[in-house]
Image: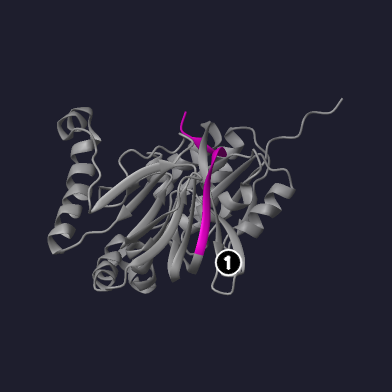
């Protein structure tokens, strides 16, 4: 009679984002303490940002995928893990760390994050899936764990200087936001929510959110829950400079500060839609644009989309969280 093989973890890491020596030491120590076997190490690259190497790990029947990188690495790993029950642990190593932030994980403590990967519990969360149709009618499928967006947020990401982002972190987006707000173009779309009546809208931004918290204490979607089986739809169209001020107050102050406590929610009252900002929830959103527009997924640009079909898959991603 032979002993069962020890569990094995695979680390999918972005070499630009991590201190590899320190990470190896921490993972080796925690794996040994937990009685796990030798860890599999797989590096992402420009040509394979995470999907390919994650599939390699899954083919070797690993028991845990550890994503060590930024939001792009986490999204790519989630895309490859879709359809598998293998849990994913997050070692936040990027600028935004959006999913980790929304799960309230520790952001700046690599040893603690590694320890939680081997000793934590599993939590199933929803996964957004999107089919993007390009101008040549070709289609490609991706996932998003935080949000998908078109309009000002996608233009902001396109306008962000990567070198400045590496040096200044989230502050690099400020210049990009200013450039994006100067863009007079609006989105003209026909859309359908959950198979309902087709509608038309002219907006500055449309976002589908699986969760809603961003850096700098911005709570973009105050009612978004990562495991409720729904996405939150946000349509933004301030009609004037005053409208932009009202919107910013609502997002940065009312959502970002007041609504974060029970007392604050009671004080703010029921969330109301208006001409500047409109929220809905759903499970499927289909849209076609009057012209191809920039689209972003989890903070990374994905080129231009002429149309898209997005839906939520409840509990489709298992994430390892602290016990």
Q: Is residue 178 above or below residue 197?
A: below
Give x and y (percent) for residue 266.
19, 28
Pick the front one: 238 or 51? 238
Does the magenta portion include 318? yes
**Magenta-tinted stretch:** 307-323
Pick the front one: 303 or 300? 303
Disc 1 secondary structure class: loop
Give x and y (percent) for residue 164.
33, 71
- At x 16% / y 63%, what residue is drawn? 240
Hey, which residue is sitting farthest top in the picture? Answer: 1
Give x and y (percent) for residue 206.
37, 57
How many labels were placed on the picture? 1
* Main secondary structure along the magenta-highlighted residues: strand
Q: Is residue 217 above or below residue 225?
A: below
Which quadrant of the structure image shows residue 207? bottom left
* Residue 96 visible in the current orientation: no
Hey, which residue is sitting farthest left in the picture? Answer: 242
Q: Is residue 165 above or below residue 279?
A: below
Quadrant holding the N terminus = top right
Side of 254 where 101 appears, left or right: right
Side of 277 where 64 appears, left or right: right
Does the magenta portion include 31? no
Colouring style: one colour
Q: Is residue 143 above or below residue 305?
A: above
Local packing at callout 1 (Cα closer than 10 Å; few below 14, some 14-19, many 20+) is some
Hey, which residue is sitting farthest front in the picture? Answer: 197
Give x and y (percent) for residue 306.
50, 68
The residue to which callout 1 is attached is: 45
- At x 52% / y 47%, what residue is drawn? 311
- At x 57% / y 62%, what residue is drawn? 49
* Residue 72 visible in the current orientation: yes
């Amino acid at each position: 009679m032979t002993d069962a093989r020890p569990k094995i973890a695979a680390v999918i890491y972005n070499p630009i984002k991590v201190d590899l020596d320190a990470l190896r030491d921490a993972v080796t120590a925690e794996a040994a303490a937990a009685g796990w076997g030798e860890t599999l190490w797989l590096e992402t690259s420009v040509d394979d940002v995470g999907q390919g190497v994650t599939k390699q790990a899954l083919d070797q029947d690993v028991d845990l995928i550890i994503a060590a990188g930024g939001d792009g690495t986490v999204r790519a790993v989630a895309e490859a893990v879709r359809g598998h029950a293998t849990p994913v642990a997050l070692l936040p190593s990027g600028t935004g760390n959006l999913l980790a932030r929304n799960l309230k994980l520790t952001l700046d403590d690599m040893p603690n994050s590694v320890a939680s990967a081997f000793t934590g519990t599993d939590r199933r969360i929803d996964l957004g899936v999107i089919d993007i149709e390009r101008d040549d009618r070709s289609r490609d499928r991706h996932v998003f764990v935080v949000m998908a967006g078109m309009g000002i947020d996608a233009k902001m990401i396109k306008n962000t200087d990567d070198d400045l982002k590496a040096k200044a972190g989230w502050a690099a987006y400020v210049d990009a936001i200013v450039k994006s707000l100067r863009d007079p173009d609006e989105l003209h779309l026909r859309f359908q929510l959950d198979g309902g009546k087709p509608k038309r809208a002219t907006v500055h931004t449309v976002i589908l959110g699986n969760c809603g918290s961003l850096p700098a204490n911005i709570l973009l979607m105050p009612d978004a829950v990562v495991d409720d089986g729904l996405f939150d739809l946000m349509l933004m169209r301030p009609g004037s400079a005053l409208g932009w001020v009202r919107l910013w107050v609502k997002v940065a102050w009312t959502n970002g500060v007041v609504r974060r406590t029970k007392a604050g929610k009671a004080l703010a009252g029921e969330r109301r839609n208006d001409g500047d900002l409109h929220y809905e929830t759903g499970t499927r959103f289909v849209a076609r644009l009057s012209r191809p527009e920039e689209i972003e997924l989890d903070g990374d640009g994905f080129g231009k989309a002429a149309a898209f079909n997005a839906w939520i898959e409840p509990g489709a991603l298992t994430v390892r969280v602290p016990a």
